[in-house]
Image (spheres, coloured by chain):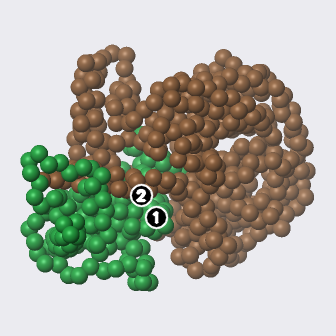
Chain colours: A green, B brown
Amino acid sequence: MDENEAIRRLVKRDASGLTWLVKTYQTRALRTAFLITHDRGLAEDAVQATFIRMWEKSQTFDPSRPFAPWFMQTLVRTAIRLAERDARQGWSHQGRCAQLDDRDFTDMVADPTPGPDVRIEQAELEERVWQALQQLSIRQRAAVVMRYYLEMSEREMAQEMKVRPGTIKSSLNAAREKLRSFLASFRAEEER
Amino acid sequence: MITPSQIHAALDHIAEREMASSPDLLPAVQAQLGTLSRNRSSSRSRVIRVMVLVTLLLLALTAIAYGYSQGWLDRGLQHILDRGLHTDLNIEQHQPISTPAATENPGIEHRNRSATPEAPGFTAVTPTPRVVAAQTIKDVTVTLNWAYADANRLAVRFTITGVTLPEGIRGSYQTGLREVTVTDHHGARLLGSEATQFQPGREPGSWVVTKSFGQSSRPFQEKALDLAMTIGLGGFTTPAIPKGHVLTPGPIPGSLMAQIAPIGDFTFRFTIPVYPAVRLEPNQPVRTGPITMTLHSLSVAPSLTAAVLCYNLPDNGDWTPEAVLAGGSNEPVPDSGSGLYGASKQEMASQTSRCWSLDFLIPYPASDDPDVLRQFFHNPSHLTLRVDSLHTSLRYDLAAMKKGQAELKRQGIAIEWSCPGRCGTEGGYNIQVSKMPAGITVQEAQDRFTKFLQRRVEGPWTFEVDLP
């Protein structure tokens, strides 16, 4: 069975279609949800809920359209919702408001003064990104994950999240601003 | 300057690292379902949610998927029917019901009129069916026809008459069927994957439905099953697209969605014999390359053979086996479904090893040999299970796609792709074969291409098993 066949079966509410999709997408989905929620349990809940939602809504899905964006869009929204609900119960933190900044996230996690022969090791970069992500609010984190992990454009993000493009831009900028502040202190600490 | 692709890679590695021992979701779904089922409330939304969860569990728990919903009976069931291994549930009493509330027929002792044929290699059990009835709710009648069970499978046929639905409904919804649930004498729901096979009945507006359930969370080890089956009709929303209507891309508009009012739940009780499986535990290890694979067990029942395979993992990817089963002179049968086996146990789904349950329908529906099943019944001498490869799920990486395209071009196959919407590593592409040499089908060409989008470890790992 391939993806097209799986989706055709899903739309007909044939269980084997969903089985194939669960098997195929769950790893990627868990990782995406984890990057947003930073919580394994919440990530699992989000992915389960998304598969359930997918089954509920399968009859309204047009098999001629790509499946992955539909699935990932639902997953991101679900992960945000669960993480925010969790945060309201006192388990998370909320970032401060954004200041517009044209600088890109990639600038924020890079060493500010790398010479042409300086290469940042992948492990170090991962650590920086990981620490930086933890400084972001849930929605900012989701914006970063959509932009850099799921490789969506800002326009696509706005369409799929059903918000105005400006809102997405603000979220990304807020994320960048916060990361810039964080990395500045990170560097200062390193220098001491 | 760090590039977006480096950030992507960093995020990918972080997620992989942090979720390195990412669980299979099945046990968690199972736990969630159990809680919800016990706390089932009367609210409609709650009921729907539970139904959905149950449905998901049915898929996920054993992940045995043999969805032959489009055709009529698969050959395994057809042959079982031809040989009379099923239990007739003839109508003895007709019970009209005036309200749509769930009702239950109390059951009537009934002796089956058909003798159970002996199936060499299996010990048949004398059937002692109870209850045979038809029920009517809101002018819709459901009649039980027959049931069959072996250690790996349960199948029930019933007829629905009197359902009137809007034109253009597709799939099993056109029968009015929403859901079928089966519980055992302890009240525990049988959880296994489902297949629905249906065709129009003799009378206008009637449908003959055969519902098949895969092996449940536990195999059927009893000599007989005392079951309660509830057939839920109506109470769902589905597209109703009139003939000739051309859908435009995008979600189906609300004007084409039909809200089907609830008709009712029809509950029947009956008892049927279980044909046991020949169960073998060869624990046979075979090493090819870096992978050692072990055939843990084989369960050969009249309608379905289940194998449990365990192997060490190349890494923590979602490595899945591709396997075929051959017996006697039959063509090898690809597995009809598979799923993680015993994933709730650490030793079964750890980071370094994994076990899969594979199902093989007997006889293979695509086989032209009318006596495939008979051979398994009368000559159960030897089975060969061959695992051709392990592979990960598809990843639509552009570099890999271009590499595949170039390689296939050398084989005379032209592959094109387009992106109708947003495409990424998860898919979304339309892959087209625009040219291929004679003797190669489009499907074969596509299969060759998709192999470039997976990580693969080629086998084979071959297991030879003698049946008693």
Q: Point out residue B56 in the picture as x, y percentages from the top left corner.
A: 55, 58
Q: Mark 2, mark 1: which one is toward the viewer?
A: 2
Residues B208 and B62: in front is B62
Chain containing the residue with disc 2: B
Q: Point out residue A146 in the picture as x, y percentages from the top left corner.
A: 27, 61
Q: Would you place residue B244 above or below residue B333 in this image? A: below
Residue that carries the numbered disc 2 in the rendered image = B18
Label 1 crowd bin: few (<14), some (14–19), many (20+), radius 10 Å? some
Quadrant containing the C terminus of chain A in the rendered view = bottom left
Q: Is residue B268 left or right of residue B390?
A: right
Q: Would you place residue B150 above or below residue B183 in this image? A: above
Circle number at residue A40: 1
Q: Do callouts 2 and 1 point to residues on the same chain? A: no
Chain containing the residue with disc 1: A
Cα distance between the residues tagged 2 and 1 = 8 Å
Tell me if residue A166 can be seen.
yes
- Type of amino acid at the residue the image marks with label 1: Arg
